[in-house]
Amino acid sequence: MAGIPAGREACSVADSTKHYERHRPDETLLYQIIEQHYPVFSALMAEQGRELPAYVRREFEGFLKCGRLEHGFLRLRCERCHDEKLVAFSCKRRGFCPSCGARRMVESAALLVDGVLPHQPMRQWVLSVPFAIRFLFAARPDVMGRVLGIVYRAIATYLIKKTGLTRATAETGAVTLIQRFGSALNLNIHFHMLFLDGVYITAQGDVFFRRVEPPTPAEMARLIHRISHRLRLAIWSAPAC
């Protein structure tokens, strides 16, 4: 009969499938480039009278401290084997930190799947806008919010009407993720909308889901025309700052 391991050996056997590898950002090419060139770039901009905005400096400076033990850490100790690990603080920034961005992406996906989205078919709708409107959205979040509401109502109404119902008898829903940049890190504000691919109907106290057929090219053309017309009216009627 095999003996039962104890102490650190027992802990390593029980957690053989789990392994913690400390994040070492200073070994990545991105970190080395920013560490080398950011101070020079920042000083050059200041000399030219074009100092970087505070939020930009916070992104760079936070990234350079992210995952570095010298900028703070937690000391974790296992109650069973008394092994210890040092876990460096993270910057939790939303700019370009790969580690914090990936963590936030995984946490957001888990929240949506486990606690928000129903177990029903979904369809992604993507709204992209002309360059001038992208700059408007960046400068006027209130206008962007109004536009998002218009787009949601237009698509929701299309889905409900496609089932032959009305808003009084059917409902749908969506989660929108606003992406603010393109693949070249250029300003490109656009919407990724995860829509229910159907509607919920209440009848005689029961709630059930009815899926709709995919949109046809003709339906998409009419929907795009309707959204474009409503967006022009909303943007032109927006009050000036």
Image (cartoon, grey):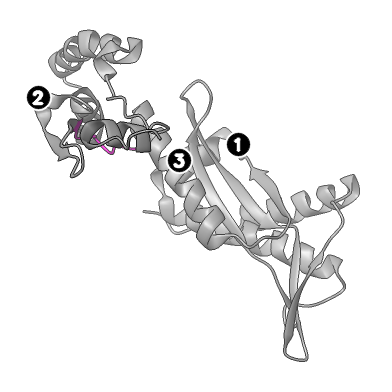
| Helix, strand or loop under label 1 | loop
| Alpha carbon separation for disc pair 2 and 3 | 26 Å
The part of the chain drawn in magenta is 87-95
The N terminus: image quadrant: top left
- Whether residue 12 is situated above or below residue 172 in the rendered picture: above
**Circle 2 residue:** 70
In-front residue for pair 127/232: 127
Q: Which residue is drawn at 85% across and 51% down?
A: 215
Q: Which residue is drawn at 35% across and 29% down?
A: 19
Specify the amino acid type for callout 3.
Met
- Pinpoint residue 129: horizontal percent, then vertical percent: 61, 40
Q: Residue at x 63, y 54 (%)?
A: 231
> CB under 8 Å between callouts 2 and 3?
no
- Mark whose residue sits in front, 1 or 3: 3
Tell me where residue 99 sits by quadrant. top left
Q: Is residue 89 magenta?
A: yes
| Alpha carbon separation for disc pair 1 and 3 | 27 Å
Within 10 angstroms of label 1, few (less than 14), some, or many (20 or more) residues?
Answer: few
Specify the amino acid type for callout 1.
Pro
Q: Main secondary structure of the magenta part?
A: loop
Labelled disc at residue 231: none
Q: Residue at x 73, y 56 (%)?
A: 121
> CB under 8 Å between callouts 1 and 3?
no
- Pinpoint residue 52: horizontal percent, then vertical percent: 22, 26
Residue 15 visible: no
| Helix, strand or loop under label 2 | helix
Labelled disc at residue 105: 3
- Pinpoint residue 220: horizontal percent, then vertical percent: 82, 49
**Circle 1 residue:** 130
Specify the amino acid type for callout 2.
Glu
